[in-house]
Amino acid sequence: MEDSDIIELYWKRLQQAITETADKYGSRLSGLAMNILHDMEDSRECVNDTYYAAWRTIPPEKPKFFFAYLAKITRNLAFDKLDYHHAEKRNVTIVELSRELESCIPSSNDLDRRFESEEIGRIVSDFLSMQPVEMRKVFVRRYWYADSIHDISTAFGISESKAKSILFRMRNKLRSHLEKEGIVL
């Protein structure tokens, strides 16, 4: 079923919308949650909460990119759950990803920087749109979907060292791009 048809089911308030969403995107949303949480039960709960959030927000929302809309919900729920479970601890995967990007993206702890976050998001999106497709996909898989280097290299048929090199170059380019746009690191 096409995304527009599924969204129409939500607008009509038909429960079939959730079934169709689960059939089409359930495994991808579960994979995203698992990459962040590394726990099957918590991942299932996040995906189910995603369906509920979609039910509550569509309408009035009419997402242009349905999977991206669902993935954003799942990702946010997974990070919220991770924060809850690890309030005093740090998750190794998230710390690793944060360290990789900390030289590119300013810290959000500073109050002034929080106000800049929307602008930074726009600049990062513009930067990614200018990159070759494969490099952009590798970057997004790593820093949005939290995929491991191994999973990325397998998915793209490249060596792990090439995946690391792509990410290293992309982070350096991103840092330069942000500086050109006036974002102080």
Image (tube, grey):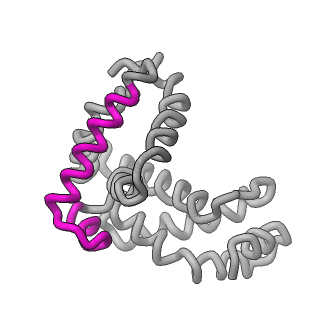
Name the residue at 65% across, 81% down. Answer: 19
Task: Say how many tags the image has.
Answer: 0
User: Residue 173's x, y, as percent?
Assistant: 32, 36
The answer to whether residue 38 of the structure is visible from this angle is yes
Residue 184 position within the rendered picture, expressed as x and y whole percent measured from the top left: 37, 18
Tell me which corner region of the image, top left, top right, bottom left or bottom right, holds residue 35.
bottom left
Q: Is residue 133 above or below residue 21?
A: above
Quadrant where the C terminus sits is top left
Pick the quarter of the image with the N terminus. Answer: bottom right
Q: Is residue 107 left or right of residue 158?
A: right
Q: Is residue 159 within the magenta segment?
A: yes
Task: Please provide the residue range marked out in magenta.
Answer: 149-178
20 vs 102, nearest the viewer = 102
- The rendered magenta stretch, by its main secondary structure, is classed as helix
Residue, x 17% and y 66% (percent of image)?
159
Q: Farthest right residue?
A: 12
